[in-house]
Image (cartoon, rainbow, N blue to C red):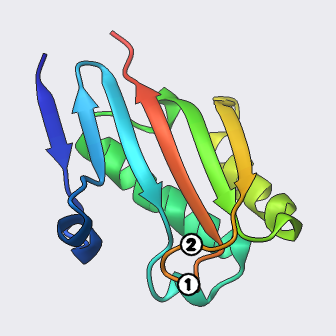
Amino acid sequence: MTRQNISSGYAFEDAYGYSRAVRVGNQVFVSGTTARPPHLDGDAYLQARAILALIADALAEAGADMRHVVRTVVYVIDMADTEHVARAHSEAFDAVRPASTLVQVSALTPTSARVEIEVVAIISA
């Protein structure tokens, strides 16, 4: 089976030895993604929107889009942000409604990140 590693060119990818996304067959796995400046200064909603845009870019490079997402995992540092992150998630996925898990964590990298999101997509034949 063919493997396609997708890079955004972000410095963390080389430093930590990972790919922004990996496509294997008809499956695409997008690594945990946080917002980048200037969106890191925003609230959880703005960060989540920026993250979902980065994820959409990675999916596009793999030949997929948000309609193909079947699972999301969302990490927040404050459960009070849940409503704001859920709003961005709902706007991005609308009727797709992927399976999703939300987890509170004590911190993210970079430290100003309030949200991190990872996804799995399956490209229909």
Q: Secondary structure at mark 2?
A: loop
Q: Secondary structure at mark 1?
A: loop
Residue beneath disc 2: 108
Quarter containing the C terminus = top left
Residue beneath disc 1: 111
Q: What amino acid type should be assigned to the residue bearing mark 1? A: Thr
Separation of disc 1 and disc 2 at Cα? Answer: 6 Å
Q: Residue furthest top?
A: 125
User: Foreground: 51 or 17?
Assistant: 17
Residue 60 place in picture, x, y as percent = 31, 44
Q: In the rendered view, would you say 99 is above or below 80? A: above
Quarter containing the N terminus = top left
User: Foreground: 2 or 56?
Assistant: 2
Q: Is residue 43 shown left or right of residue 124?
A: right
The answer to which image quadrant residue 47 occupies is bottom right
Q: In the rendered view, would you say 112 is above or below 48? A: below
Residue 87 place in picture, x, y as percent = 78, 56
Q: Residue furthest front?
A: 106
